[in-house]
Amino acid sequence: MTLFLAAYLAGVLTLLSPCIVPVLPFVLVSFVPARSGRPLVAGTLPFLAGLGLAFTAAAGPAAVGGGLVARLGTAGRLLAFGLLAAFAVSLLSHRVSDRLHRPLVRLGAAVAGLSAAPSSRRGTGIPGPFRSLCLGAATGLLWTPCAGPILGLVLTGAALNGAGWQTTALIATYAAGAATVLAGAARLGRPLAAVLRRHLGLGDRLRRAVGAGLLAWLAALALGADADLLARYPAAGTVAAEESILTALGVEPARAEPSRSLLPVEGALPDLAGATQWLNGGSLTKEGLRGRVVLVHVWTSSCINCIRTLPYLRAWAERYREQGLAVIGIHAPEFAFEHDVGTVAAAIRRHGLPYPVAVDNEFRLWRGLRNSYWPALYVVDAEGRIRHHQFGEGGYARSEAAIQDLLAEAAGRRATDRGATPTRAAGAEAAPDLAHLRSGEIYLGSDKAATFASPEGLSFGPRVYSPGRLRPNQWSLAGTWAVEPDHARLAAEGGSVTVRFRARDLHLVAGPGPDGRPVRFDVTLDGAPPGEDHGTDAGPDGGGTIVETRLYQLVRQSDPARERTFAVRFHGSGIRVYAFTFG
């Protein structure tokens, strides 16, 4: 209640400020449109009501807005100039007045509860109160009061803590205080108007004089006369008076309440000292990350689901780095070859990861997070608490919103919806075509093998296999293969692997033998080269080379809606194949 009193008194002090000068002429002539015997009711009061409402409507959004509000404010000022200029011209000419008023006659009559027919007297088609209300609204758009401590207090509080009905009510109270003294100014100007009416003869010459004067004044305002006036005569006196009011009433400046995220606490970031080693940057500690929001990505280098999350990790790391986001990867191996640090380092380079990666070969960090998934995302707040998680692909909008929310909490400000970050993805990193995906991951090692269709059956150790008749999502071997726990190894030249699938993309996790020699291959779709359906690691003729152990994209179909039979034949021995994945 105290702040409302201060806002009203600040509005009253507006009369002593040079900021009132631009609108004062319009207030003093607000009785001109009033043809009734009650100019206060028909002219001045509607005028002041329109001025107050327009100022409140414009100042409220400005309290929390940005560049858009500034552009709208400029447009409103131009609109005000146009409306007031039209009013001034209507005072100069009855003919112009009739033309300007004619489209609004029925609206004005409806508002006033009058007949739809215009008055027989020229220039009186719009009811006086309605006309004065419109002119007051236009003047309110033109008025920019001096932002003294009290109005500044109101607007700053809204900007810090958000606009609400209290902010609107305080601005309206400020406008009411200004309207009170402006009504007094208009009443003081009325005796002068009565003298002019007696000496100039009923109204017409007075109307023309006022119209000409208003046009001249608008021209001066358009040329910046109001800015020059405020520069020469600053509102130091009213500012000092407002400061005295704040001191007397004991009102404190607005302060922002610390932003608190509503995200639950799910646990704590484990001690990072359990990492085997760190790649792509120095080692990090939990204590060293205190005060920063941390995004943790648990992944493994050959996992297609992990690979498809990497474009988001790169984009978020770049966008939010300056705001305090730290991104770290935790590489927990799925296959035996992924324990090799060189393999992990190659994957980091291949995907262009800009953040440090902890090698977690002993799964200490994995267990510390109580994790069970590849990939997994954890968003950690500035105090080291896990506040959001995402298991598997997807949920990118929710994860980014959590990042934004916790960054705002760390900065002590309100979270804003800044939209999704654009990502760049190509090849295996591209999002899957879930609408046509009908095939799931197929492991080729004995520990997890299923849907095997070679007539010999799957057995441990070297054996000659022959192709089988495949149903959807079945696979077979041809040639001499040694099936190990997590892969199948080609023991003699000329072996192949076949799978029946339905998906846009087909990937094969594969690598050369222990000697590391590259192995050439050819792929076919339904017995023919893939042509335009080839993947990034195979040509249109189906040719390619296995040069390192990683995931290879061998098929990307242009028409993924149909089932296909895929086969890959290797021209060499020692090749190891681990799994088919699809997208």
Image (cartoon, rainbow, N blue to C red):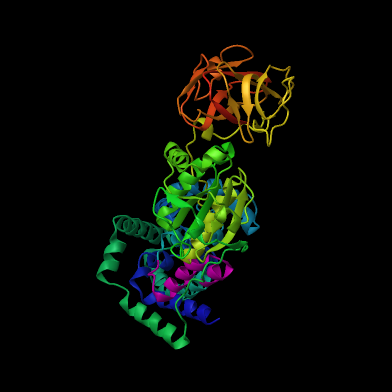
> Closer to the camera, 402 or 81?
402
> Closer to the camera, 549 or 92?
549
> Closer to the camera, 382 or 286?
286
Q: Which range is magenta? A: 145-170
Please state, as top left, top right, bottom left or bottom right, where the N terminus lies in the image. bottom right
Asked if residue 40 is positioned above or below residue 142 in the image, the reply reads below
- Report if residue 161 lies within the magenta region: yes
Q: Position of residue 207 (x, y in %)?
A: 41, 59
Q: Position of residue 116 (x, y in %)?
A: 63, 50
Q: Looking at the magenta stretch, what is its main secondary structure?
A: helix
Residue 120 visible in the snapshot: no
Q: Residue at x 48, y 52 (%)?
A: 276
> Closer to the camera, 219 or 169?
169
Q: Residue at x 35, y 74 (%)?
A: 17
Asked if residue 471 is positioned above or below residue 355 in the image, the reply reads above
Quadrant in which residue 562 is drawn: top right
- Report if residue 190 lies within the magenta region: no
Q: Is residue 440 shown left or right of residue 404?
A: right
Query: Extreme bottom residue here?
Result: 248
